[in-house]
Image: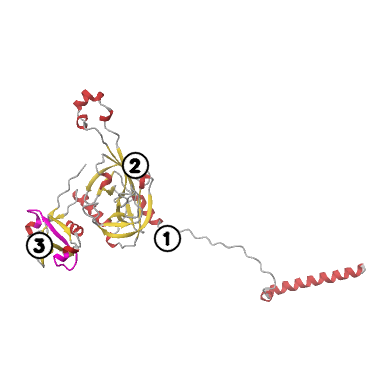
Amino acid sequence: MNKQAHQKLWLIFSQTVTICLALIFVLRLFFPNLIEGVLPKKTSPLVVKYAEPSLGINIAGSYSQAVKKAMPTVVNIFTSKNVTNSPHQKYLDDPTFRQFFGDQLDDQDRPSQPENSLGSGVIVSAQGLILTNNHVIAGADEIEIALSDGRKMSAKVVGTDPETDLALIKIEADNLPAIAFASSDKLNVGDVVLAIGNPFGVGQTVTQGIISALGRNHLGINTFENFIQTDASINPGNSGGALIDTEGNLVGINSAIYSRSGGSMGIGFAIPATLAHQVMDQIVTQGNVTRGWIGIEAQDITPGLAESFKLKLAQGALIAGIQRGGPADRAGLRAGDILLAIENKPISDTGSMLNLIAALTPNQKATIKIARAEQTLDVVVLIGKRPQPIALR
């Protein structure tokens, strides 16, 4: 093939390619659907959708807003107590004795270093009132509070109630964040709760769990027991801290744990916020807690006792003893009577009986339903004032 023929073929080829490209361009421009699938599709870049900022709205499954609301109201409590191992301490404190023998005292007769303990508390008023456990501050010579913003200040005791293991202390400060109380009477088993405190002194910590049970008593912890049981981790140092709901409101004061190792085993107990509020109000208004009292000793009704007394249910409280001259004695109650209800509120056991009587107002009359000799009677009792327990130091 000569050169001229070669050029002619190349010209025909190039013209054909140009016409085809032009035809494709026109078809793609005016009839894009005609060549769908003819040309290879262009791969699109990966598009990632980013979540918008929450703007203060809780992410599903997060309790961060409840924690942000409640955590500033929880404080750390440091207490110190001066102790000595010397049996001669009363002489060491005598100025005359120390004047003559002070320089000759043995080291074993000198007071030891202060003991320090750690607990938690909850700010309940902007003016510095703090609710905590009585056992956290009992016998302390000095109480120091560490706020969530890092400030530390001394606190003084306003009042205590050893029978519920609650105490109210105060720091000299204003405009503090105060926790909001929820009604613990509306709680249900299975509700999510959060515990805030300072376990083992590691720093402020939040743990999460559910309400495992309500109305726990007969634990031998307090005189008056109506505990919230939770599996939220509560450890040494959490005592007096807050148990909150998912809205950040106070439902209980963490108080005790069941443990064989000293650490959390998933069984913790908190004092209901409703009871804590009642105790706090009485301490603030009258300086102490006043409870109803009728002067009896009682025991639970067992199935065997229920059968012997011909009761349909093993419920109520059997009067085992009566204080002579007390309210129950003056009203005509006897040993062997079975308390069934107080002011139309049924008694399930001695724990509920104690709580119902304690809630009554001294110097006012109350109707108590009893079972005696297979009969049901209503007895009116003039409620007395429960004697204050002897404080031990």
Residues in magenta, as a range: 306-328
SS for dot 2: strand
Q: How far is the residue under mark 2 from the one under mark 1? A: 34 Å
Q: How far is the residue under mark 1 from the one under mark 3? A: 53 Å
SS for dot 3: strand
- 194 vs 294, left or right, is right
Q: Which amino acid does label 3 sit on?
A: Val
Q: Give the labeled residue for mark 3.
A: 380
Q: Give the numbered dot on residue 61.
A: 1
Position in image of residue 14 (x %, y %): 82, 69
Count of numbered badges drawn on the protein: 3
Position in image of residue 346 (x %, y %): 18, 64
Given residues 254 and 167, the one toward you in this image is 254
Q: Give the labeled residue for mark 2.
A: 152
If the image is split into quadrants, where does the C terminus sit?
A: top left
Above or below residue 29? Residue 225 is: above
Of badges 2 and 1, the one in the foreground is 1
Residue 360 visible to an observer of this rendering: no
